[in-house]
Image (cartoon, helix red, strand yellow):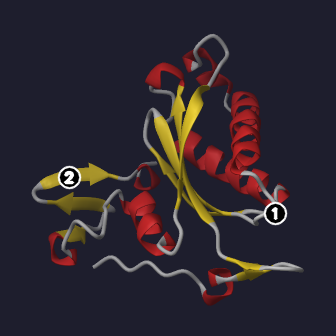
Amino acid sequence: MIRCFLSNESDIRRGRHCVFNLHVHLVFVAKYRRRVFDARAINVLRGIFADVCSDAQATLVEMDGEEDHVHLLVEYPPKVAVASLVNSLEGVSSRLLRQQRPDIRKRYWKGVLWSPSYFACSCGGAPISIGCWVRYGVSLASVSPRKIFFDSEGTRELGGRKRRSMRSRS
């Protein structure tokens, strides 16, 4: 059974003049969908994205990825524009990943990591289900919880098909 909860302290944030609960689901794709990321790169990116978010007074709620793209769920204040947050996340992560993992540099496309386009979706009042989807790769609205289970290796099985999360690979 999958259980996802947001802690009570992160449900509603308070600013000086507003009370808010803003979440955005972001997807960044590697340039030409090249297979750049492995489990170590995903973990390095998770730390980089968390640092960039904290600098922008945002919070990285969830992050996971596959070989050619990453999904992020970010909670952000109303004064932060999503476009400027994306520019910071993509720019800083590309530069720091290149510095921390020189072996990945050869997989960049002409020195460029990210595609210039990205996907952004406002999560509104449903960050719990989006967080579960980012973490487990399953839309909880479309799948009965009885059909989802995990074995001891962290492999999700759904309808006889297995998918291993990048988080469980190492």
Q: Position of residue 165 (x, y in %)?
A: 38, 53
Please identify the residue farthest to the left as the structure is shown.
160
Q: Secondary structure at mark 2?
A: strand
Q: Residue at x 80, y 79 (%)?
A: 18
Q: Which residue type carries mark 1?
A: Gln
How packed mark 2 is, by other alpha carbons closer than 10 Å (few <14, some 14-19, many 20 or more), is few
Q: Secondary structure at mark 1?
A: loop
Residues 168 and 145: in front is 145
Image check: 26 left or right of 97? Answer: left
Please identify the residue farthest to the front as the structure is shown.
17
Q: Earlier in the sequence, mark 1 or mark 2?
A: 1
Q: Residue at x 71, y 64 (%)?
A: 76
Q: Residue at x 31, y 61 (%)?
A: 138
Q: Quadrant of the N terminus?
A: bottom left
Q: Position of residue 58 (x, y in %)?
A: 75, 62
Cα gap from disc 1 to disc 2, whole angstroms: 37 Å
Image check: 65 left or right of 11? Answer: left
| Disc 2 target residue | 162
How packed mark 1 is, by other alpha carbons closer than 10 Å (few <14, some 14-19, many 20 or more), is few
Residues 152 and 94: in front is 94
Q: Residue at x 67, y 31 (%)?
A: 101
| Disc 1 target residue | 57
Residue 34 visible in the displayed image: no
Image check: 4 left or right of 152? Answer: right
Q: Quadrant of residue 104?
A: top right
Instruction: Point out the frontmost of discs 1 and 2.
Output: 1
Q: Position of residue 119 (x, y in %)?
A: 52, 42
Residue 18 visible in the displayed image: yes
Residue 20, compared with residue 95, is above or below; it is: below
Residue 60, compared with residue 39, is above or below; it is: below
Q: Quadrant of residue 92?
A: top right
